[in-house]
Image: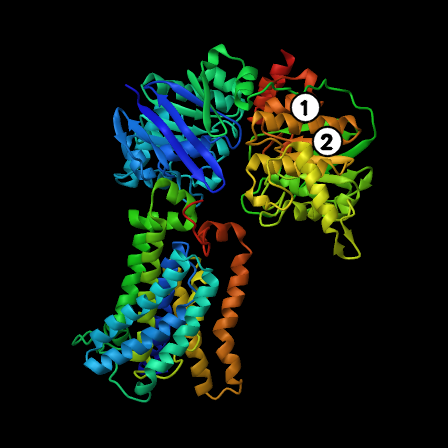
Amino acid sequence: MDRLKLEGITKEFPGTLANDRVDLSVVPGEIHALLGQNGAGKSTLVKMIYGVLAPDAGRMFWEGQETTIASPAQARRLGIGMVFQHFSLFESLTVAENVALVLRDAGSMDDLSRRIVEVGDRYGLSLDPRRHVHDLSVGERQRVEIARCLMREPRLLIMDEPTSVLTPQEADRLFMTLRQLKAEGCSILYISHKLAEIQALCDRATILRGGRVVGACDPARESPRSMAEMMIGQELSQPHREPVEATGPVRLEVDGLSTATGAPFATEIRDARFSVRAGEIFGIAGVAGSGQAELLLALSGEVRVAPASLKIDGKPAGGLGPAERRALGLALVPEERLGRGAVPALSLADNTVLTGWKTRGLVRGGWVEGAKATALAAAIIKRLGVKARGPADEAGSLSGGNLQKFIVGREISAEPRLLVVAQPTWGVDAGAAAAIHRELIGLAERGAAVLVISQDLDELFLLCDRLAVLYHGRLSPPRRTADTNVEQIGLLMGGMFEAAENADAA
Amino acid sequence: MSPDVIAAVMMSVVAAATPLLLAALGELVTEKAGVLNLGVEGMMLIGAVAGFAAAMLTGSWIVGIVAAAFAGMAMALIFAVLALTLLANQVATGLALTIIGVGLSALVGRPFIGVPLPRLPQLYVPGLTDLPVVGRLIFGQDLLVYLSFALVVGIWWFLEKSRAGLVLRAVGESHDSAHAIGYPVIGIRYLATLFGGACCGLGGAYLSLAVTPMWAENMVAGRGWIALALVVFATWKPVRTLAGAYLFGGLAFGQLFLQGLGFSIPSQFLSMLPYVATIVVLTLISRDATRIRLNTPACLGKSYHPDH
């Protein structure tokens, strides 16, 4: 008997058919992958399974019984648990309090703390129930989320992009936990863009495209490439780059950069040193919260640093603001797309004016040149294949992946001499990621220096000539990509510098 | 100073602090759920006039107190419908609520201006109340004073120890997460807002039934705003709210006392004292961003759209 069976599930939002007669079945003790590009309807589908959204049509069967799942509380009563991509934890509460909130019979806090530790030990999730969530690393937060689900002994666990924030070693540990759950008969519905891990972990895969099921496969018999092609429905042309030894002039020089942003819970950068030459792609790896946000603030000019510790084209720029740095030829794609990369309530055309008003000549005599901005936005939409109706669309109405394509396109089309880009393909599907990677490679080939800050090691190894790792605000010495490997970088990301050195010697 | 004078001074401080404490405790619970209701002043005024009118018309001060609580709740309900159900901006709605309260209380209260009423009865325990200094202070207060202390303990226990309080804090911290787990965000915020309204109503009634047992137009005179500041001052903690209320109460009384002694400082400067103290303290505690972040409900004042 199927644990969960969906028949003809349909959900329509104004203007889009998010799910169109979707059929799906999940059997006990399997890890079932849900594949699809951004906007293929995966999130909508799992939200309906978890009771966050209600389907317009179709039938759901839970262990053979037809049911309608009206709320997350009901889903949990049935035995469905979900680990969200953006965690649903409460930062100012303790681990135990966070767990207590999802249990109906939490009992006393001491009792509960003991149970949390028990569950943690059983599944290899070490947790201290008394700590506040805001003190935890992203990997630890995810363990809290998972432990929280496991306390209810779920029979179906939904995981939305669980490894996007983990080091490779943390991801391996997660897979062990998931395999143990599977062996105990729990079903797992697994959403990820990382096709290699789906291949290693999942028993079956259902592929969605444009809201419809377009196929199913056994991931073990497929390659990541063939699965990607099923997702996008056409052949995938993966960009490729041979690492080069750049000899051009140094465009960005960071020499002893330290930050003091003063923000609560910030990981301040201490004495970072690296340089990026023209024609080079330089990568900075690290798990979330290692200081990437602070480094970006220092690079963008939102936080000033000692003038000589940051040079653009040889000119001390540490004391300059964002606009002055842009005038020196810097372009920047921040990690947060909404609010920092783009203003959600403004049109795409207006958003091009925000960063390009001076460098692109979109303002003359104090007046915005509307027609020029619209034409530029239209050109960016066309160049990157952004899914939008036109330059008049509000930035906030685009899906995350599409907005990212637009922002990357906006910055690259200015042909900057130095581009800093954070998480270029976070939550972006294979097709769009390939487009963004191609643009970044092309920009470097045309002689720009490119700095990529990312948590995705596959991406860094694909793009970069040299790599450094950020851990707790400290930057490791750069290594040539050709001289290192994923394991070594993974150890550095976990702060195990010594182990990484030994791996080096081996 | 003789013991009698000290006792009288202390009683005056209690009278000045109690309305602030009642209103601030209510607003604290409201804000902990993530709702910023700036209509405290308006709710206190409506509570003051309703409490006075009901007590006078029925001759029962208990009816007066209950009426004040319900009147404050009714005002809070208007706010809740506008800001929580219809998703109006909370700041604007709260300010409007205060303006409504000022006008409506003046209109309703017109027949009662200048009518005297006996003060809220105070406890008298033979022997104990007659003790010098502390006797009246501890055993000679009225119901609302004792209630305000009970509320400090009760709210502390509710927020820190009870499961319902944990849920309320969770809703104020992240309404999206609370919704994802399956808690009725809007419903919980309604309850917190109504509780806040009831407390503000009681705070107002304390003015018109105990401090000066009569009705005068706009008699709350800015205490609602001090109560609002008090919540931030106390970093959303009930026991600190108690300390803050008595500190501000002391300042308010000190102002009268200094004037009584004939100090030649213009009274306007003295009237400014509580507000200056608030600004100074707010500036000082704002310097510690981590503490603010830990105690401030992260969703304070944000509208919640359930469909996102």
Nearest the camera: A416 or A469? A416
**Total marks in image:** 2
Q: Which residue is mark 2?
A: A450
Question: Eyeballing the image, is A479 above or below A296?
Answer: above
Could you tell me how far apart the alpha carbons at marks 1 and 2 are, in whole angstroms?
A: 10 Å
Q: Which residue is mark 1?
A: A463
Where the N terminus of chain A falls, by quadrant? top left
- Report x, y in % for residue A229: 56, 19
Which chain is indicated by disc 2? A
Nearest the camera: A456 or B108? B108
Is circle 1 on the same chain as circle 2?
yes
Nearest the camera: B103 or A251? B103
- Report x, y in % for residue A446: 79, 28
Tell me the element at label 2. Answer: strand
Question: Eyeballing the image, is A158 above or below A407?
Answer: above
Q: Is residue B224 left or right of residue B215?
A: right
Tell me the element at label 1. Answer: helix
Question: Eyeballing the image, is A193 above or below B90?
Answer: above
